[in-house]
Amino acid sequence: MDAKILLGIPTSTPSCIGSYRQNQVGFCQFHACPTGPSWRSHAQFSQDFKQILSKQRRGDFRSFAFNIKDIFVKHASSKEGVDDQTIQGEVILQKVSLFNITDYAATIADEASELMGNRVYLQLVSSQEVDSETGVGKTVGEPSVLEWSPLDGPIAGDTRHKITFNWKANLGVPGALLLKNTHSREFFLKSVTLDIPGQGKLRFKCNSWVSPYHVSKSDRIFFSNKSYLPDATPNGLKKLRAKDMVELRGDGTGERKVSDRIYDYDVYNDIGEPDQSPELAREVLGGSKEFPYPRRCRTGRPPTKTDPRCESRASFPNVNYIPPDERFPHTDFSDFGAHTIMAFANMIAPTIEDLFETAFETFEQIENLYVRGFKSPLNSMKSLREKPSPLQIVQGIVEATEDNPLINFLRPQVLAVNELAWKTDREFARQSLAGVNPLVIKCLETFPPTSSLDPNIYGPQKSTITEQHIKKFLDGLSLSQAIASKRLFIMDYYDPYMLYAERINKISDEIKTYGSRTFFFLTDDNELKPVAIELCLPPIVDGKAIRSVYTPGEDGSEEGALWQLARAHARVNDSGYHQLISHWLRTHAVMEPFIIATHRQLSRMHPLYKLLIPHYLNTMDINQAARQSLINAAGVIENGFTPARYSSEMSSKIYKDWKFNEQGLPADLLKRGMAVRDPTSPYGLKLVIEDYPYAVDGLDIWFTLKQWISDYLSLYYKDDASIKKDQELQAWWNEIVNIGHGDLKDDPSRWYKMETREEAVEIVTTILWIASAHHAAVNFGQYSYGGYMPNLPTMSRRLIPEKGTEEYSEMLRDVNAYFLKTVSTPRQATLIMAVLEILSQHAKHEVYLGQIHGSTPDWVDDSGVVEAFNRFSSKLVQLEKNVIARNNDPNLKNRRGPAQVPYTLLYPNTSDLSESGGPNVHGVPNSISI
């Protein structure tokens, strides 16, 4: 009988159907009834209709229409059998909203939902026993209701909830669970742990925001910690595996809502604001040969009115869309890196401008930033709270409790022991090996160096440096001997800056730059010393290119004054390249396509997904914050670094030459000539500079990481054939190459193939290296070295004056004063110092490489994984001891240098379980989380 009548369904049990069960009891179009997969009938219809209707009249039921013909169909399945089991479980979740730690409104709404009968329901799904109607694993009876206590309150942290399931032993061990949230607000589900009679613990690692059903329109699917390659997926889970990934991919249309769980790609077309001003228009990065770029997460916001190629921007305090699970809930304000950056850039940085004069006059004024501080531009904590911003942003950016608080900068490490060491040539050179940007220096194999730029536009390709310039600094060697013995090195910023030098120098009278080449010689003590700096400009005036070579000179001499300024310009080039290329492009930007592809093409059941996912924590969140407040038009980077409005565009030009198969440390060292293959040396590589702290510590981590990945993947892939036939793995790699990094897809020499286990290990090791050690090396030392602006200035505002001019005479009278007029202004310096201090912070709940909690063993319960990970972790703890021993070895002078800053940026910190966080210059986190 198909006639529909009005019936009541108990509010404590939802009536819902799966998309695979069109005749399921309770099929309807109301938002209270999900169309997600396979829930069983939730009313026992053996009761008299009169009893049901009487309850309806008392208001105990919600009403909706369903087909009467199905009322009695499933009743027989509810009979108890001898194989009935009761499974006890614990659910751990955080009852917070997506953008607030302590959300009273969310808590009240949840408890009101509970009182109204809107609950959280879970149902187990069999792995092996398949329901013939749905093609999905069988379930048992009604879903279970989560015990949700109104007494919990708005807790900033985990809450634990008991749950009981009815199960049948003949269905085997459950492989998935279905969850429906009928509350009015989302919550963050961390895990579900079940006690299976006779089997032990069964874990479900979830770490996912669960939206209300009326928003998501579908039930959530979670799989147990058991991993399966695609062709080994149990029959009961195959359709759920496919369905889950389809939902994550979306259809590439529409504007994303904050609750959407969709991972998709787009170009960087949201950096500029052409509707606000033509001066704020920026090139679209990605999708063209002229401006190639990695892809970002698609938001689908409408285009700008001025330029339909560009996407309109989110206005602070709103944030760019990223899938909800990329915003992990935190329980401590120190963990809000992305939001702290946005708050600083939008609420505090604009107020700093009027606090300072146009230039520092003395070094003592800079010193006072650490000793005396300066008055906060915020009138009071109350005024900050009155600004339109999420609660977490307010508390994450400032902890002042009284009016007119002072802002004091921490004294950076480079000043801590010897405050004048930064001025020495030894420390200047040492930082190229053990500073914040130690992955640019190259062994000079051809002299003089040459450029690939068009000489008709940029001037002669060959450097003007000669043997005569540097001969006296080569400790008695000839030039040919120095090159043959691999003792000449270069930091070459000619090409990146010459591409934009003319345009940068036309922006303002207060922004001037060169393209620089800095040359070093390796002494018998295994230390570098700088021997020359070449500063270059394209042929602007009279069609003549400028090529000026400066060499070290005594303090107080004319040559010494010119050398001091040349070093400053070289450091400005270095700081800009570090921030835009070594840091942003080569870690943050290139990583995002890997994250997106992982969610789109690898099931949560896939062992590689479980290996990768801990290394993606918070990366997309910090990246969206960077697009909004750091790399955007007139943002922090453009206001604080010399490339200014061409900053992001410059990084696009460098990306043209980016090759994935050169991003691993051994390949990178070989490319730069900093290592040679040697089968008799550890790891088969011999470093050209034995005391190269970044490379020495980094190689230890690389090969330890590679061994762990090899051990892990060998548990699932027994031969090369298993790599080739894994459809998800092949789709993942294909999407990364052809879509995520699609602008570079036509050059196969950039990429590994995915055909062998060896290639798979190299690919995954490279990804995890970028996310962990590479990022740690270029990020967490930023304040230690850049927190004192003269050591690492980010802006140059004057070119070196020509001899015979009044400016030249001014320089000779007081070179220190002229130096301060050349580099960053107080406003620029304090802006960048504040940002670098934020970026250099470790989160309180940081997960370091090799720590079990928060890493792959949390996601996997497969045999052999914990044992392999423990070997990995133990090896990293040993590496910590190695780092300490090297730093205490007086023969390794580059480990500390004149500034006495020990090299700890690649100290793993695996053994530290204190959760102290803060501005530590040691520790290699799992992911790019700041």
Image (tube, grey):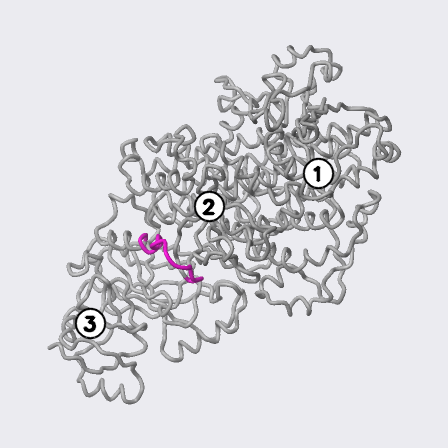
> What is the magenta segment's predominant secondary structure?
loop
Q: Secondary structure at mark 1?
A: loop
Q: Which mark is residue 25?
A: 3
Q: Residue at x 33, y 49 (%)?
A: 603
Question: Callout 2: few (<14), some (14-19), or many (20+) C-alpha neighbours within 10 Å?
Answer: many
- Looking at the rendered structure, the kind of residue marked 1 is Lys
**Left or right relative to 894: residue 319:** left
> 360 or 509, which lies in front?
509
**Left or right relative to 576: residue 809:** right
**Left or right relative to 904: residue 73:** left
- Looking at the rendered structure, the kind of residue marked 2 is Glu
- Looking at the rendered structure, the kind of residue marked 3 is Val
Q: Position of residue 444 (x, y in %)?
A: 61, 20
Q: Nearer the viewer, mark 2 or mark 3?
A: 2
- How far apart, in angstroms, are the residues tagged by discs 1 and 2? 33 Å
For this orientation, the residue located farthest to the right is 813
Q: Quickly name the residue at label 2.
A: 592
Instruction: Pick whichever of labels 3 and 1 is earlier in the sequence.
Output: 3
Q: Residue at x 69, y 32 (%)?
A: 570
Q: Quickly name the residue at label 1.
A: 512
Which quadrant does the N terminus fall into? Answer: bottom left
Q: Position of residue 60 (x, y in %)?
A: 31, 84
Q: Position of residue 689 (x, y in %)?
A: 61, 22
Q: Residue at x 30, y 34 (%)?
A: 718
Q: Inspect the magenta stretch and tell me whether residue 676 lies in it.
A: no
Q: Are marks 1 and 2 in contact (CB under 8 Å)?
A: no
Question: Callout 3: few (<14), some (14-19), or many (20+) C-alpha neighbours within 10 Å?
Answer: many
Q: Secondary structure at mark 2?
A: helix
